[in-house]
Amino acid sequence: MLEIKNLHVKLEEEDKVILKGVNLTVEAGKVHAIMGPNGSGKSTLSYVLSGRAGYEVTDGSATLEGAELLEMEPEERAAAGLFLAFQYPVEIPGVGNMTFLRTALNAQRKARGEDELSAGDFLKLVREKAKALKIDADMMKRPVNVGFSGGEKKRNEILQMAMLEPRMCILDETDSGLDVDAMKLVSEGVNALRDAGRGFLVITHYQRLLDHIKPDVVHIMADGRIVKTGGPELALEVEQNGYAGILAEVA
Amino acid sequence: MALPQAKTDALEARIAGLSLPAAGWSVPARKEALARLSGMGMPAKRDEYWRYTDPSSLTAVSPKAAAPLEAADEAPAFDGIDRLTLVFVDGVFDAAASDDPALAGVEISRLAEAGPDIHWARDLYGVLEARGQSPVQRPLSALNTAFASDGILIRATAKAAKPVSLVYVHKSDTSDAILHHCIKVDAGAELTVLESGPAAARFNKVMEVDVAEGGRFHHIRTQGRDHDRRAVTHIFARLAAESLFKSFTLTANGRLTRNEAVLELLGDDAVAHVAGAAVGDGDFLHDDTVFITHQGERCESRQVFKKVLKNGAVGVFQGKILVKPGAQKTDGYQISQSLLLDDDSQFLAKPELEIYADDVQCSHGSTSGAIDETALFYLRSRGVPMREAQALLVLAFLAEAIREIEDEALADDIRSRMEGWLNRHKGA
């Protein structure tokens, strides 16, 4: 599904190298988790994959089902099936949440040569998906993320994911700012999307999200590289010993 | 203080080819306006009030040539709205193209047909314009009162059955039109006036609006899409107790536009909103100059002006709220914002508050900035293509101004015009 090879990335504005040769393959149907201390490059990886400006790829490649991601515009990556759930979802005053979702969905369908969804079909679909995430009609009418609580913003991200049905989902610290109940709700939303054709890359500091979204593979990232890969037990080890222990072990 | 010779000379040159009508009830008011004008001369770039907008093309003897735009790609403004239409071609009334001016709740006549008889407009024509000359002079509006060739006089005595729509067609490259409308909304009456079109190569328009107690007046206009036209317009409004005035203007293109609104809230509990959305690409200067005087108590005023500028376009905002002694519980709000789509465009703003009452609430804000890159990336990351995402954000920026239009059908018409413009101007 997603194949990252020897990815080197520096900041465009300054001479700071962030990713120093990341190698990672996420297979269809699998959930991979990336854990790591602050500043290890986890969020940068998610931004580079989704096409945010400000980063320069100096070496390596990233492909989604064989297509080179790094040469595509952000909207092309989305149409190809990539989705990033933002750590800090963006507020867009003046653009209604419903308009936003519909514009995005139809733009992707159009890019893939599919027919646009009719207003009626769209409404039916969005109501059904929103209900599962306990997103009420009022939230759909409000401008995108404006005045939403932390939990509401994250649920809104998952709603977008559910509507757009991407092939490859990247979740960047989706657990940050969530209370226990909200985390459960968000995790249920993610778990409902798990299927054999879809890959997940879950970025998190903490093991607790992985109690709800059970990973198949856990990677530890430090200083711009994946330094250790293992099963779900690796997340428990982080929880018990912190990153220091693991980093000392691989150093 | 003696008037600078240059101002007098410019005035004499400007009015040399113009003449007052020989007879009719408007003549005394026109003579008074001419006397006012002689004391002011023509405005010049050195005047404080014209610091950001060079008036020379508005005061020149003849207009600069401006070709009419063939806008076959868009339905005429307010096409789907049930309305009474009155048409001017290059400033000349076109009876054949106009509807029969008969409308329940409304009396309509023409300034050009002003006979010697008593007419309600005699107490209004030039009266609000004259009031508006202090504390700031507006010579081009006095010029208009003196020499207007025509105009529509509308009196609403009840709730008008439908909007009155003034359509300004521009056909001649060198047309120079001066129109003066008077609108009187009687106590408890309600009227919507629509204006659309570029009118002429050069257009000087005054609209005086007198709203009696509890009256409601709505005004929505689009100023056409001609690239080279120039226009100076004034709205003078006087609001009695518990009356309402709401005006919205869409300006797309036009080499020079100066829209002045001079509003007086005289009675208690009156409401005045004036809003504008202006979009310019290239050789475009748009100036919104607003002066709102609060005299009554508990009145509310709002100024909401948004501009989208690219390729060297210039936006100007001069907005003032004057709260007179005794105008307690005034609620004044003023916002002027511009979205600069490149580094070549500029926005000049002069917001002013002058307050002589101690229990008032007034706020103002002015910003200029680029499109929010983070929001743009967020939209694109969800699959919305670059240009579409930009258009969505530009429309979102303009939304607050468009929200000032109460009627949903009219707001939709304006919105679709806005989208059309953005579509045509989406390239760099």
Image (cartoon, rainbow, N blue to C red):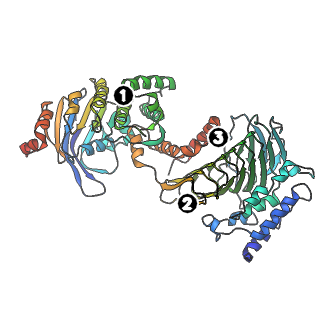
- Look at the numbered disc 1 and give the secondary structure of its residue: helix
Question: Relative to B168, does residue A32 appear above or below in the rendering?
Answer: above
Q: Are marks 3 and 1 in contact (CB under 8 Å)?
A: no
Query: In the depicted view, which residue is nearer to us: A229 or B52?
Result: B52
In screen coordinates, is B147 left or right of A76? right
Chain letter of mark 2 equals B
Q: CA distance from mark 3 to mark 2?
A: 32 Å
The image shows residue B407 at horizontal and vertical percentages of: 64, 37
Residue at mark 2: B349
Q: Amino acid at mark 1?
A: Ala
Residue placed at 70% from the left, 44% from the top? B243
Query: In the depicted view, which residue is nearer to us: A19 or A93?
Result: A93
In what quadrant of the picture does the N terminus of chain B appear? bottom right
Question: Is there one chain holding both mark 3 and mark 1?
Answer: no
Q: Quadrant of residue A104?
A: top left
The image shows residue B75 at horizontal and vertical percentages of: 66, 39
Residue at mark 1: A162
Q: Which mark is residue B243?
A: none
Q: Quadrant of residue A158?
A: top left
